[in-house]
Image (spheres, rainbow, N blue to C red):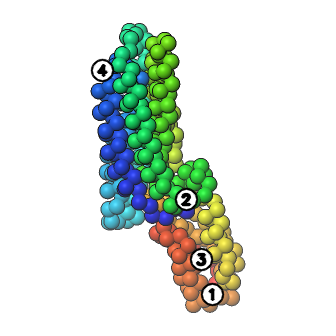
Amino acid sequence: MKKESNSLRAVLFALGGNLTIAVIKYIVSVISGSSAMLAEAIHSLADTTNQVFLLIGRKRSGKVADEVHSLGYGKEEYFWGFLVAVLLFFLGGCFSVYEAIRKLKHPEPLGNYLYIFIVIAAAMLIEYKSFSVAFKEFRKTSPKGFLKALKDSTDTNLFVILVEDFSALTGLTIVLITTLLSLINPFFDIVGTFLVGSLLIIMSYLLANELRKLMVGESIPRDARNEIRAIVRKYSVIKHINNIRSMYIGNNDFILLISVDMDDLSSGYAIENANEKIKMDISDKYPHAKYIYIDVKGGN
């Protein structure tokens, strides 16, 4: 399970870096005529807008619970992250693919290769730094099993930034290779544009699918449920655990519903005392268990 992370630092760092990169890439794409560089400029502009959306989601998800939203506004961050995936990554990818098709019909020679390579090198350094900042924050709460932890992560901000920075580095690598090859044949610049667009569309699907699960109501990981089950079983008044249900509600917080059968010979005081101790033990182990409900059956 993840504890609170300083994802705001990662978001702000990525925002500044991507905005700078987007401006530089666009200027160089105009100077050189590189459609692959234009695709990368679109990629970086989408990433910049991503961070704005993530900041909006972070702000709105922090609103306190009220009468209309009694469990809070935590799922706001999933919604804004979903917009990032669908509107920005997907549309940006489609535009890049369109640009590749347009350039295929009306090919133009490239120029000013030196500027292109300088921008690629600078962008890769900035993107790597942004990725390392987000990765460092992620590692504070998930020290082992990176891929599994990333899949189980509910910190939308860090998850989106890690994915977008990884795709940015991959995209820059593609542009670097295809630009080098375009020195031999300008057609490879079109190939690079198409591949970057395809990469954005793939990332859009992966992000949207993960956020869809959280929006619908994803449960906490199985190992966490097993640990909670072990905590409940420690109490002798518990005869049987019927089921444990959970659902993330944003900001890493989740609801926990536990149905148990109590010993029929247990007193009302013993049952109530066990209930409170179970809740305290679970809260100590999982501070993000914001709402814990225990449905008790049996007892006198």
Q: Earlier in the sequence, mark 2 or mark 1?
A: 2
C-alpha gap between disc 4 and disc 3: 71 Å
Q: Earlier in the sequence, mark 3 or mark 2?
A: 2
Please name the residue shown 50% across and 34% down the image.
Answer: 170
Farthest residue toward the front? 114
Camera-near label (4 vs 3) is 4
User: The C terminus lies in which quarter of the figure?
Assistant: bottom right
C-alpha gap between disc 3 and disc 2: 34 Å
User: For the residue marked with disc 2, what is the amino acid?
Assistant: Ser
Disc ID at residue 142: 2
Q: Is residue 265 above or below residue 165?
A: below
Residue 73 in percent (x, y) is at 37, 59
Q: Earlier in the sequence, mark 4 or mark 3?
A: 4
User: The N terminus lies in which quarter of the figure?
Assistant: bottom right
Q: Is residue 226 above or below residue 36?
A: below
Horizontal side of 141 relative to 239 (left or right) equals left
C-alpha gap between disc 4 and disc 1: 82 Å
User: For the residue marked with disc 3, what is the amino acid?
Assistant: Val
Horizontal side of 137 relative to 56 (left or right) equals right
Q: Secondary structure at mark 2?
A: loop
Proximity of marks 2 and 1: CB atoms separated by less than 8 Å:
no
Residue position marked by numbered label 1 in the rendering: 300
